[in-house]
Image (cartoon, rainbow, N blue to C red):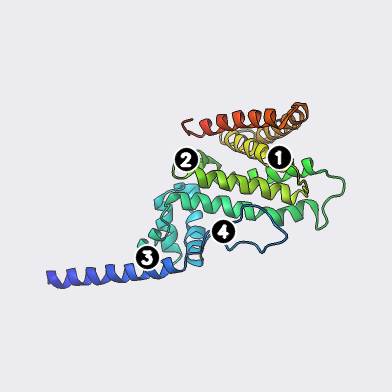
Amino acid sequence: MAPSRATARLAANLRGLSHLQRLRSLRAPLPQRSYHSYDHPPPPGVFSTAEKAILSAAYRHVPEHGFTAHALSLGARDAGYLDISTNLLPEGPFSLIRYHLVTQREALAPRSEALFGAQGEQGLQVPDKVERLAWERLLGNQEVNHRWQEALAIMAQPSHVPSSLRELALLSDEIYFLAGDTSVDPSWYTKRGSLSIIYASSELFMTNDRSPGYGETRAFLQRRLDETSKMGSALGSVGQWVGFTASAGVNVLRSKGVRI
């Protein structure tokens, strides 16, 4: 009896591995372009069909279980996959965090149409739209805000810092693109760099905000945007501006647990 049970377990494991290999073959390549372009087609999706199925199902468990391997296992089962299928996501819980970052960023485009209309609100300037879009993105954290400090701790791990910062850069570019920014001078970089710092600071502030509707977080966001706008006008050179934003960026990374 014992040998037959062992044989059955071995056969089940082999089937699971074969299933996992098929899933790995479906993994989508990572997109290479990190900015909007009217001259080139958009990059392929970040996640494959199988990955999206597991991650979307696992995401529903985040409010209760956090961004954890347990949430991923529950998601795999809900999506009809074997538990071993979570090995399809080699970054583990960070894959779930990245899923949140990517889907919330991609959701901004349809939200911007609802906010500004198909043609955009004529009375709003780019800075006003940037503030509203940044606030809209922060609201996307509402359901997982009580878990977000855990997520920040994972994002601050050395192996995940580059991907985390890249997603932050993509978010800033998305916001300025949707706000209608058409600058082609060095301010293209300084605007997005400063917004990245402000958004990261506001996101961190929000994790400790207990005010109704996160009103204190929005006030914090508005103050930082206003201060940065004034500072950008006051600084006399690009070198001074870079020094200011770099110093602020170091402080934000330190607040996220990165040793600098």
Q: Which residue is mark 2?
A: 150
Alpha carbons under labels 3 and 1: distance apart: 45 Å
Sequence-wise first label, 2 or 1:
2
- Disc 1 marks a residue whose amino acid type is Lys
Query: Residue 246: percent from the left, percent from the top?
Result: 61, 31
Residue tagged 1 = 191
The amino acid pointed to by label 3 is Leu
As measured in the structure, the alpha-carbon distance from the residue carrying label 3 to the one carrying label 4 is: 28 Å
Q: Amino acid at mark 2?
A: Glu
Q: Residues within 10 Å of mark 1 (few under 14, many from 20)?
A: some
The residue where tag 3 is placed is 82
Label 2 environment density (alpha carbons within 10 Å; few <14, some 14–19, many ≥20): few
Q: Quadrant of the N terminus?
A: bottom left
Residue at position x 73%, y 51% from top?
178
Q: For the residues carrying marks 4 and 2, which lies nearer the camera in this image?
A: 4
Query: Are there few (<14), some (14-19), or many (20+) residues within 10 Å of tag 4?
Result: few
The tag earlier along the polypeptide, 1 or 4, is: 4
Q: Which mark is residue 31?
A: 4
